[in-house]
Amino acid sequence: MALSNLIVTAGAAVATALGYLVLAVYRHRSRINQLRKRGVPMPEGWSWFTGHSLVLLKYTSRFPPLANVALAMQEICRDFAESEMLVLEMWPAYDPVILSFNPEAGIQMSQKFNLPKPEVSRKSVEPIVGGLSVLSMNDNEWKYWRSLLNPGFSTNSLTDHVPYIVDCVEVFCDKLRAQTGNSVFSLNDFATRLTFDVIMKVALDVDIDYQRSEHILPTAINTITKWHSFWDPRVLLNPIRLVINRYYGAAIKNYIRKEMEQRFTELKQERLSSPPNISKRPKSVFAAKVSHQIHTFLFAGNDTTSSTIVFMYHILFRHPEVLSQLRSEHDEVFGPDASKAAATLKAQPALINQCRYTLAVIKETLRVYPPATSMRQGLPGVSLTTLNGISVPTEGFGIVINHQAVHQNPRVWPRVDEFLPERWLVPPEHELYPHPGAFRPFDMGPRTCIGQPLTLNEMRIVSIMTVRTFILRPAYEEWDRIQAQNVSLWSKMSSLFGKEEINTAGTHPSDGYPCRVSLVE
Ligand code: HEM
């Protein structure tokens, strides 16, 4: 009797749960179905059972397994040139999204409505950075932290950092020099270490010299980042990920806390007749939150900047005419002796602002290879309009603006497939003058990237101090031969999927950009 009661109760619970699931799926899917009937653009192949999951699989299968999903999204976008916007639905795996590459919708999303960051962004960023992050906060909490952090990235503060960045780039140059005539090396590794050193100095005023030695902080951050995905269930559901996050997360927290204590003690000693607000130690909750923001800088700023540095060298390799014009500008602004550029930069940091062509090359690099994309949350009463005039209500949707696709949109970028730094130097009446809203590697509006000025400074300094001295050449074929000699069964299987020269992983150059370096004669 007791057993049959138990079976009936369990059966009823399972039936209720199933009923609830079916109802929830029905509610979600019928909403999408209504939009479909109203002509809201979405890919063919939507089904009541799987939504668009199989459609996404079809597109991702066109790329190697490790390729960034943003590339598949860009591919989907190509099929929606008429609307420049579409709906994708994979519930319950993910909330449905409006995928857009329409610059006007981008302006609405980030400037007109300044839509909030979505819950999914908080859920995926916070386990990595250890807690609340300015990247995913909203409303007053975001305003508070952003205003606290802004001064560290102001023009004055960044000008003060130029000599330090120059020192870091000198180490980068020494490493390149030591590599001339040697074997193939990963340029991405060199660039990542450089960028890490720069962010650590700007964010924590500490010199970890990661370019020349190993350090627990980058090891921990890189390991956590490798175990991160915004979407891939193979990564997200892997239990090892939790252990990794916990172990390395604690290492990061301890290190940053220790450094903050140190900075605080130094500050206190400097101002012994101190104002009351620094006479006590920072409260531990506040200190923990600061530590999350610093971790956020390293997470959001390191990969993005280092990939862009590598992409810039790749572009210069492909476009010798651009390289030669870049060198001429550096000769003009810093004099013909490249070895004096570092000292001149330290003495007169403002000279970087005279390098207009250099900045144009960096912007065009970011147009061709934007390393990040943006996501917002739709709201009741807010609709976005497709290029062909269909209104899409945003409530209940995440909105992804795919920067790769916006930057390749031929409607707004004349001669879209050409690398043209000139488009950043022409007057507004010129046909090449960029459309407002179409260039968004750092996003736009109040939530624009806080690290943008730092990145642009660092990249200009890197370019000024290297392009007249070094020649960098990709060495993928040689790299593949070396790999083939040491292949494992797994890598043999992976190579069946083929490899592109660059950008197979979306935000990173593939295989860390194997290359060779020589000196300019
Ligand atoms: C090439 C280099 C970089 C690119 C392309 C880039 C791109 C972006 C983008 C697209 C966003 C908006 C993200 C979203 O909407 O979810 C963003 C936000 C942010 N980035 Fe960057 N970033 C770069 C470098 C940096 C650096 C060097 C730092 C810090 C040292 C940094 C810190 C941040 C922070 C804190 C935010 C959140 C800003 C807010 O919401 O108030 N980024 N970045």
Image (spheres, helix red, strand yellow):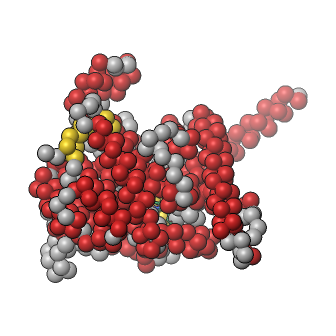
| Quadrant containing ligand 1 | bottom left
Task: Tell me, yes or no, if residue 462 can be seen here.
Answer: yes
Residue 332 falls left or right of residue 76: left
Quadrant containing the C terminus in the rendered view: top left
**Residue 438, quarter of picture:** bottom left
Judge by depth and name the residue closer to the eye, 272 or 474: 272
Residue drawn 31% across the image and 55% down it: 462
Quadrant where the N terminus lies?
A: top right
Up the image or down, 226 lies above or below 304; here it is above
Residue 154 spot, x, y in % from top left = 46, 73
Q: State which quadrant residue 260 falls in.
A: bottom right
**In the image, residue 416 above or below residue 171:** below
List x then y, in percent, for residue 426.
17, 75
Residue 341 pos. (x, y %): 27, 60
Residue, x 68% and y 57% (percent of image)? 261
How far across and how far down the image is residue 91, in percent?
51, 50
Q: Is residue 519 left or right of residue 305?
A: left
For image coordinates 31% across by 59% down, the residue present is: 342
Q: In the image, is residue 177 above or below residue 490?
A: below
Give the tally of numbered discs.
0
Report whether residue 412 is seen: no
Residue at x-position 69% and y-position 61%: 265
Q: Residue furthest left?
A: 321
Q: Nearer the viewer, residue 358 or 497?
A: 358
Residue furthest bottom in the image:
429
Q: Hey, which quadrant is residue 301 in on the image?
A: bottom left
Q: Nearer the viewer, residue 499 or 332?
A: 332
